[in-house]
């Protein structure tokens, strides 16, 4: 939402006035020859999420030992030297930014994967990306490899799993069901291998691997942030296209072909982008469950679109992970819970809620 | 505008169309009919480049459709698949707007032309009043009109539809077909549809294509090609073809297949009213080598003069009982000669078949 936003013309649903009437609930954003359709509700939701994210950010910088009053946090952020600079800038800010960036990446990955899978339950940890990264990380952690090797190894593992998934799912043009089934198969196989590696390893190493698998932001910061952010940045042009392409991803293949789309090529593009984002973020922060699953679905409901909206899902993912990390730090302080535990604890009931809601609607 | 050359198409191992050469006239309403699994949907999907043929080509105005960018094809030819998936929660205007896809790019997502085309399409399909409604809350008939509106928003010269009336009740079927007819007549669009109902096909089509087992059996104006022989040939069904009392188009009435069908419900039959049964029996007369010749029984004799009247296109008991039945008899007599392949047996009694159960009649 950083582009020069021209005041959108109020679109009348059915009348084509002298200007351009957009579709109901949409506004046009015109910059020179560029004209983008924007859901008005998406804009509102995105704005609200940004505000909430800022509030959660300040809260996250403020809470902890020592406590820093929000006013002092703001003062420190504005560059006026305060006694809290060390706490705010060096201890809390890196982790906060990492949570936001990683959460956004999870949100993006989840949105793309769910759109390709046509399934609200699909996410990087269901289709095997997380397990690929987890297996590689476990191997690295239990064989005494240097700490710096863990993240690159996890990235390689995630990408290898993604490749396997795409190859297995490629027949029939990466059809939704095949994509999901291939992913579930890959996930189970890799998980089993991970268990084997963990059980045969030194118990201490096994525990370290276990913690990595749960996913935590503790002790992480700028380095991890930079890697995730670079990946997202590299994917940005594709994401701009994806935002538009997702618009028609709910159509079946015949209908899509009928209106001049190439659904298979489109699906492969979206899937590759999604698994790249998922592998990149999982390699850095581990398997933070459910953010990728929940953020897109929650965003979709907030925006009332037929498919998860990319930008709102990213913002919501960021918000969720920031809150989860904050809760993990504070709920049982001084004991720190990994963010992944918190997201899983929230995600489970959320899934049940979705199921119950679905049942009520269908009855 | 669409034609095929030596078209071979199918799914996986199964070849459905084997060497099809076909010419679809422009500015006409073409209807493809045929029994289930005869390849009519496969043909339509191949024509609309939804299915890639194994061999041969589909030509769009003389150019191989595969060599044209799919986006360009989508500006010249719109297609409505058999049962398109309705995206959850999408509004009518939104879905109709998707029809503008071939004119859009991710950096040019909407224009004045798009707005105008969507408005036009919604007005034409009579769904403008539903613009803000989610499509998944609409009735089947409304929904089908919305899908048609989406294809209309594509502003194409040709429109291909795969069984657009399936799952609709009769009134909605007529509504959809009337819309397609208007598109052809008032807007000069080329319309190609796969239909199940032969009588609707005969009523609306300018050009009828009858298919069986992946091959075209007959093609031409329905009034010229639709005969009882063709129906038997294509569907394996004995029938009578009479002129439709409303349009004059051929009307296909299946022959009597079971004597019990000719029996009126016992409780609703007053004493002297053997006449109602004469209707189907009259049809049997025109059809019928086997069933019609079954020996007349006494009960039929009472209504012998009412029988021909009832024979006209599904006339019901009331018609048979009233003296008005007589004009109907004349019309029945004027049925296309093709309708009576074997010598008609004029003196068949009203409910001859109802009286006895000749085994060959069942």
Image (tube, coloured by chain):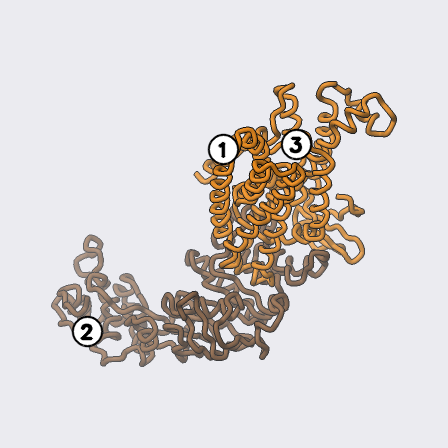
Closer to the chain start, of discs 3 and 1, is 3
* Chain letter for the orange part: A
Q: Can residue B108 be seen in this view?
A: yes
Callout 1–callout 2 Cβ contact below 8 Å: no
The C terminus of chain B: image quadrant:
bottom left
Q: Residues within 10 Å of mark 3 (few under 14, many from 20)?
A: many
Q: Nearer the viewer, residue B103 or B50?
A: B50
What SS does tag 2 mark?
loop
Mark number, residue B292:
none
What SS does tag 1 mark?
helix
**Residue at point 66%, 26% (across, down):** A326
Provide the residue designation for mark 3. A217
Looking at the rendered structure, the number of numbered marks drawn on it comes to 3
Provide the residue designation for mark 2. B290
Q: How crowded is mark 1: few (under 14 residues within 10 Å), some or many (20 or more)?
A: few
What SS does tag 3 mark?
loop
Residue A75 picture location, percent across and down: 84, 25
Using the numbered discs, state the Cα–Cα distance from disc 1 to disc 2 in whole angstroms.
65 Å
Q: Which of A149 and A74 is in front in this view?
A: A149
Does residue B188 lie above or below A97 as drawn?
Answer: below
Using the numbered discs, state the Cα–Cα distance from disc 3 to disc 1 in whole angstroms.
27 Å
Instruction: Nearest to the eye among marks 1 and 2: give it.
Output: 1
Using the numbered discs, state the Cα–Cα distance from disc 3 to disc 2 in whole angstroms.
85 Å
**Residue at point 57%, 34% (across, down):** A209
Q: Label 2: chain?
A: B
Q: Can residue B93 be seen in this view?
A: no
Provide the residue designation for mark 1. A352
Q: How crowded is mark 2: few (under 14 residues within 10 Å), some or many (20 or more)?
A: some
Q: In this view, does B304 lie to the left or right of A217?
A: left
Residue A46 picture location, percent across and down: 70, 39
Residue B36 picture location, percent across and down: 37, 65
Look at the image and give the colour of chain B. brown
């Amino acid at each position: 939402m950083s582009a020069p936003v021209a005041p959108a013309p109020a679109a009348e649903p059915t009348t084509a006035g002298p200007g351009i009437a957009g579709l109901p609930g949409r506004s046009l954003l015109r910059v020179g020859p560029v004209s983008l359709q924007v859901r008005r509700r998406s804009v509102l939701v995105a704005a609200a999420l940004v505000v909430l994210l800022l509030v959660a950010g300040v809260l996250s910088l403020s809470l902890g030992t020592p406590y820093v009053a929000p006013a002092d946090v703001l003062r420190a952020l504005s560059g006026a030297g305060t006694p809290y600079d060390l706490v705010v800038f060096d201890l809390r800010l890196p982790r906060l930014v990492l949570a936001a960036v990683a959460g956004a990446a999870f949100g993006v990955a989840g949105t793309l994967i769910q759109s390709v899978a046509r399934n609200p339950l699909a996410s990087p940890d269901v289709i095997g990306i997380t397990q690929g990264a987890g297996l590689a990380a476990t191997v690295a952690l239990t064989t005494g490899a240097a700490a710096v090797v863990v993240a690159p190894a996890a990235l390689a593992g995630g990408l290898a799993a993604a490749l396997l998934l795409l190859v297995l799912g490629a027949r029939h043009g990466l059809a939704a069901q095949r994509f999901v089934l291939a992913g579930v198969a890959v996930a189970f196989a890799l998980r089993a291998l991970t268990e084997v590696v963990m059980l045969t390893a030194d118990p201490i190493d096994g525990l370290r691997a276990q913690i990595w698998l749960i996913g935590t932001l503790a002790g992480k910061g700028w380095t991890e942030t930079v890697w995730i952010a670079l990946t997202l940045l590299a994917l940005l042009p594709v994401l701009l296209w994806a935002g538009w392409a997702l618009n028609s991803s709910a159509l079946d293949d015949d209908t899509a072909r009928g209106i001049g789309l190439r659904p298979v090529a489109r699906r492969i593009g979206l899937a590759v982008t999604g698994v790249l984002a998922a592998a990149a973020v999982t390699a850095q922060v581990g398997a933070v469950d459910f953010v990728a699953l929940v953020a897109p679905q929650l965003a979709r409901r907030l925006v009332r679109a037929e498919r998860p909206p990319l930008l709102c899902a990213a913002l919501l993912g960021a918000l969720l992970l920031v809150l989860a990390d904050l809760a993990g730090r504070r709920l049982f302080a001084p004991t720190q819970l990994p963010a992944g535990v918190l997201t899983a604890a929230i995600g489970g009931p959320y899934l049940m809620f979705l199921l119950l809601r679905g049942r009520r609607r269908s009855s | 505008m669409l034609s095929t050359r030596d078209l071979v198409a199918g799914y996986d191992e199964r070849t459905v169309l084997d060497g099809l050469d076909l010419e679809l006239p422009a500015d006409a309403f073409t209807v493809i009919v045929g029994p289930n699994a005869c390849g009519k949907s496969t043909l339509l999907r191949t024509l609309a480049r939804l299915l890639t043929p194994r061999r041969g080509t589909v030509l769009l105005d003389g150019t191989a459709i595969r060599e044209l960018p799919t986006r360009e094809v989508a500006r010249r030819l719109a297609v409505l698949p058999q049962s398109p998936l309705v995206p959850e929660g999408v509004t009518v205007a939104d879905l109709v707007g998707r029809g503008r896809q071939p004119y859009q790019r991710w950096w040019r997502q909407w224009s004045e032309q798009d707005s105008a085309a969507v408005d036009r399409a919604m007005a034409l399909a009579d769904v403008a009043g539903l613009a803000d409604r989610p499509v998944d809350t609409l009735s089947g008939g409304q929904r089908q009109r919305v899908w048609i509106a989406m294809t209309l928003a594509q502003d194409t010269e040709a429109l291909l539809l795969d069984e657009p009336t399936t799952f609709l009740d009769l009134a909605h079927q007529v509504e959809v077909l009337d819309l397609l007819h208007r598109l052809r007549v008032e807007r000069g669009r080329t319309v190609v549809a796969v239909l199940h109902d032969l009588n609707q096909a005969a009523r609306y089509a300018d050009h009828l294509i009858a298919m069986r087992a992946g091959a075209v059996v007959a093609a031409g104006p329905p009034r010229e090609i639709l005969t009882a022989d063709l129906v038997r040939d294509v569907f394996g069904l004995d029938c009578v073809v009479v002129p439709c009392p409303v349009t004059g188009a051929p009307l296909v009435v299946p022959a009597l297949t079971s004597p019990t069908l000719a029996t009126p419900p016992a409780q609703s039959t007053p004493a002297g009213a053997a006449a109602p049964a004469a209707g189907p029996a009259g049809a049997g007369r025109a059809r019928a080598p086997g069933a019609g010749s079954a020996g007349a029984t006494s009960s039929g004799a009472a209504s012998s003069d009412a029988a021909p009247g009832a024979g006209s296109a599904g006339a019901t008991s009331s018609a048979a009982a009233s003296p008005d039945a007589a004009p109907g008899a004349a019309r029945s007599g004027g049925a296309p000669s093709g309708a009576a392949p074997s010598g008609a047996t004029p003196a068949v009694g009203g409910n001859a078949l109802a009286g006895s159960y000749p085994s060959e009649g069942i």
